[in-house]
Amino acid sequence: MTVLWTSEDAAQATGGRATQPFAVSGISIDTRSIRPGELFVALKDVRDGHDYVAEALRKGAAAALVSRVPEGCEGAPLLIVADVLRGLEDLGRAGRARTRARVIAVTGSVGKTSTKEMLRAVLSVQGAVHAAEASFNNHWGVPITLARMPAEADFAVIEIGMNHPGEIAPLARMARPHAAMITTVAAAHLEAFGRLEGIAEEKAAIFDGLEPEGIAVVPTGLEVSGLLMARAQAHAARAVSFGADEAADYRLRAATIAGDVTIVQADHGGQPLLFKVMTPGRHFAMNALGVVALAEALGIDAAQATMGLLGWAPPAGRGARERIYMDILDEAQSFDLFDDAFNANPASLGAALEVLAGAQPRDGVGRVARGRRVAVLGDMLELGPEERALHAEIARHPAMAAISTVHCAGPLMRDLWSALPPAQRGEWHETAQEMAARAPHLADAGDVILVKGSKSSKVSLVVEALRRLAQPAAAELFKGKE
C-alpha cells in the first residue's frame, strides 16, 4: 500500500488528535465508493457523515476524520478535529505545501472539466499528473483533491467552480497555482450574480491565488475580457490570451469538423498551429487552444502539447459520442448519441447545438426515410429572473435551422418548445422521467440525438433509457465500425 498520510502527519496538518496510529492510502467522503485503506471524511451536508463512519470502517477504511466519536466507534482509528470541513481544508493545504508539483487551476462558465482533462492528457506526456476527480471543484472538492495529491507528482490540475459570490478566491489561495486559466464567461448562475460582470469578477478571482511568477491564461472576444485581463495583469507575472479575435496571443483561425474530430487552425506570434481535437465542436477547439497556450507558457513545446491532446476524449455526460446498435445482425439499425447531460447554460447549449447541426445523419435505414438531427433538452437552471426568456431565445439560435426535431423536458423548457415552429416541435414532458419512458419513440435508425440539460433536470435518465435500446452484444460485434 502506498501511504498518503500517516496519523502523525495528518494530526500535525490539522491540529487534531489521533486515537491510535494509522496510515491511509487515499481519502473518501462516500461509503458507496470507499476503498480499503482510505481515510473517511465525515462531512456534514444533507446528511451527517458521522452516521456512516461505522459503515466506512466495516468496508475497510483505515481511519475516519471526525469531530466527535460516533456511536459504536469507540476504540476505532479516528482523527478528531474541532470541525471536519476545516480539518479537510487543513489537510488540503498541507498536501499542497509538501508537493513539488507545478499546480494549474482552471475555472470558467463552460468547459472546466473538459479543459482539466485536456490538461491531464497534455501534461501526462511530461510527467506524473494528479488531477481532480470528476467535478470535484467546490468547497470540499478542492481540498480533497489537494489532500489526495501525491508528494512526488510533477503536475497537478485543480478545477475550481462556484455557485455564489466569494467562493473562488479562498479556493484559489488554497491551491496556490503556478498557472490559472479561465475557459470563458457566460450566462450561468445569474440567479446568484444578476449580471455577467458579476460572474466575470468571481471567475477572475482565480488569479488572486497565483504564486509569484504565476501565469494567467485569459479568453478574448468576450464582453468582459477587459475585466478578466485587468485582474490577470494585477496578479500574474505573465498574462496570455487566446480567442478568435485579432488581439489574441493565440488566435483561432478556423475549427473545421471532419467526422468525429475537429481540425484546429491557429497561430501564435506569426507561427501557424495545426492540430486535431478528438471530438467535434468549436468550443472544444477553443478550450484546446487555451490549453496549448498554457502549456507553452509552462515551457512545453507546442508540438508536444498538440500531440498530447490526441489522448483526450470528452468524458461521459459532457459531449461524448457513441453509437447505439438496436439490432445484433444489422449494424445499420443504429443511431448516434451525444451524451451532454451533465450541465447546461445558454452558451454551452448553443455550442452543443452547433455540434449537432454539423453531425451527419444516415438516410434510408430507419422508419423515417431521412436520418434526423434530434435534440432532447432539459431545463437550464440558476439563470435568474430572465430564465424563461433565455430558454425561449434558444429557438432563434442559428444552429436550430439544421435540427429536425426538438423534444423538451421541464417547466422552463416549455418556453423553448412553445417558441419553436410547429413542424420542429417534438414532445414536451413535465419531467425527464416522463421523457425517458418515451425513449423507444424518440430514436430511429440513422438519427443523431443530442441529450443536454442541467444535472438537476435529470435528463441523464433519457440518456440511460436510450442506451437501453441497444442490443448488449451488438456493440462488441460492430466495435470499430462507427
Image (cartoon, rainbow, N blue to C red):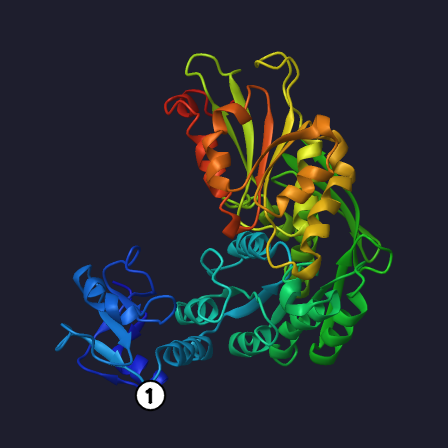
Q: Assign the C terminus to one quadrant of the image.
A: top right
Q: Could you tell me which secondary element the residue under label 1 belongs to?
A: loop
Q: Give the camera-side residue of 130 and 456.
A: 456
Residue 64, horizontal then vertical, whole percent: 25, 72
Q: Give the camera-side residue of 369 and 302.
A: 369
Quick check: 183 above or below 343? below
- Evaluate whether residue 298 shows in this view: no
Number of other residues with Cα within 10 Å of mark 1, as a class: few under 14, some 14 to 19, many 20 or more: some
Residue 164, horizontal then vertical, whole percent: 59, 70
Residue extending farthest bottom:
15
The answer to which image quadrant residue 102 occupies is bottom right
| Residue occupied by mark 1 | 15
The answer to which image quadrant residue 382 occupies is bottom right
Residue 311, horizontal then vertical, whole percent: 54, 45
Q: Amino acid at mark 1?
A: Gly
Task: Kindly identify the residue that appears in the image at 66 percent across and 49 percent down.
Answer: 348
Q: Give the camera-side residue of 427 and 278.
A: 427
Quick check: 153 above or below 314? below
